[in-house]
Image (tube, rainbow, N blue to C red):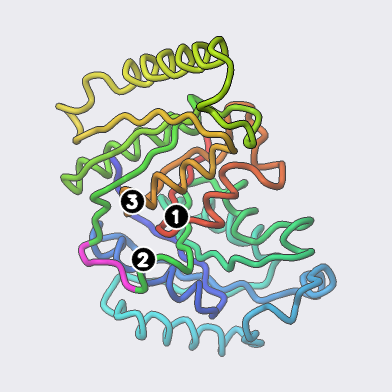
């Protein structure tokens, strides 16, 4: 059973982090959780290694001012009545966040996405992506396109769970089913079969190729059905979706999430190869970066 007893929400006083706070507060209220608010004061090392410092939110330079700003943010989010703790300390942001999540035994980490582009995006990765890669607990990323204020009590009625049969994805499937059960909602479990040439017009390919693709689809549907068989009556309503897509799986996941439309996307933070998040451009990164709804990622 999924229970969030301690929710960690790092805040950098930007608009994306304020949006994430509203979701963290709604979850804490729904699960009667403790809400831990964190602000990481930058160190000299942080400044030295941040090429796009001009894009950073305004810095709160003293612990006292940061603590006051955290309290103000919680009040502005309508969460002053929740059981909250405030932690301000120095450090390298992503390391401080994941360390605190481990030390506090957080059940969920809620963080916003900035959607930055350019040099820092490509070569260094964002704080959010580093947190996803190393966090000891599930991470809920809240994109700028998500609803400004989630419903209270928060419920995810339409969940899209992307499956690649990796240990992380299987763990995500359990979370998706339980969250769907708690909401009395529906989970769409999705598997994407990619083919290599996105320019190839499928209606005009060779008959042998078409037959091979149909075999792949049939095998994928059977494997997916076996995975979820019996869950529909014991956990929640479940749909199975197998898609043949001429591009990377992330595009198909985003298209399906938009069509549903999904309230939540659930997926593993590591692909079946186990090293997906070490590579810029992974499916997980693309989904987190471009989703229109929150994304829950889980490591194995």
Disc 3 is placed on an element classified as: loop
Upstream in the sequence, badge 1 or badge 2? 2
The picture quadrant where one finds residue 79 is bottom left
Determine which of the numbered discs, if any, sits on residue 116 in the image.
none
Establish if 248 lies above or below 154: above
Q: CB of mark 1 within 8 Å of CB of mark 2?
A: yes
Determine which of the numbered discs, if any, sits on residue 140 in the image.
1
Establish if 25 lies above or below 285: below
Tell me the residue that label 2 is attached to. 23
Other residues around mark 3 within 10 Å, as few (<14) / some (14–19) / many (≥20): many
Other residues around mark 2 within 10 Å, as few (<14) / some (14–19) / many (≥20): many
Tell me the residue that label 3 is attached to. 262
- Residue 150 falls within the magenta-colored stretch: yes
In magenta, the rendered stretch is 149-153
Q: Residue at x 65, y 31 (%)?
A: 197
Q: Position of residue 158 (x, y in %)?
A: 27, 48
Residue 182 is left or right of residue 64, and the answer is left
């Amino acid at each position: 059973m999924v229970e969030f007893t301690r929710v960690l929400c790092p805040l950098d006083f930007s608009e994306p982090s304020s949006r994430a706070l509203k979701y963290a507060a709604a979850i804490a209220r729904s699960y009667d959780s403790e809400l831990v608010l964190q602000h990481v004061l930058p160190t000299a090392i942080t400044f030295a290694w941040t090429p796009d410092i001009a894009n950073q939110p305004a810095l709160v330079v003293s612990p006292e001012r940061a603590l006051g700003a955290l309290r103000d943010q919680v009040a502005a989010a309508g969460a002053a009545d929740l059981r909250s703790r405030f932690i301000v300390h120095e450090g390298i942001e992503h390391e401080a966040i994941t360390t605190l999540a481990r030390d506090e035994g957080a059940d969920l980490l809620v963080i916003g996405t900035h959607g930055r582009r350019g040099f820092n995006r490509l070569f260094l990765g964002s704080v959010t992506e580093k947190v996803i890669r190393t966090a000891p607990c599930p991470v809920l990323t809240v994109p700028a396109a998500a609803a400004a204020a989630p419903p209270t009590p928060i419920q995810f009625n339409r969940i899209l769970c992307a499956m690649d049969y990796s240990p992380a994805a299987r763990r995500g499937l359990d979370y998706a089913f339980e969250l769907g059960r708690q909401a009395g909602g529906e989970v769409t479990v999705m598997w994407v079969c990619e083919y290599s040439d996105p320019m190839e017009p499928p209606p005009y390919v060779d008959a042998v190729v078409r037959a091979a693709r149909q075999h792949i689809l049939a095998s994928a549907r059977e494997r997916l059905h076996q995975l979820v068989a019996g869950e529909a009556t014991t956990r929640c309503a479940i749909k199975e979706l197998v898609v043949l897509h001429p591009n990377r799986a992330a595009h198909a996941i985003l298209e399906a999430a938009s069509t549903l439309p999904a309230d939540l996307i659930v997926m593993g933070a590591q692909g079946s190869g186990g090293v997906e998040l070490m590579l810029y451009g992974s499916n997980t990164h693309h989904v987190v970066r471009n989703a229109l709804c929150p994304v829950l990622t889980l490591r194995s």
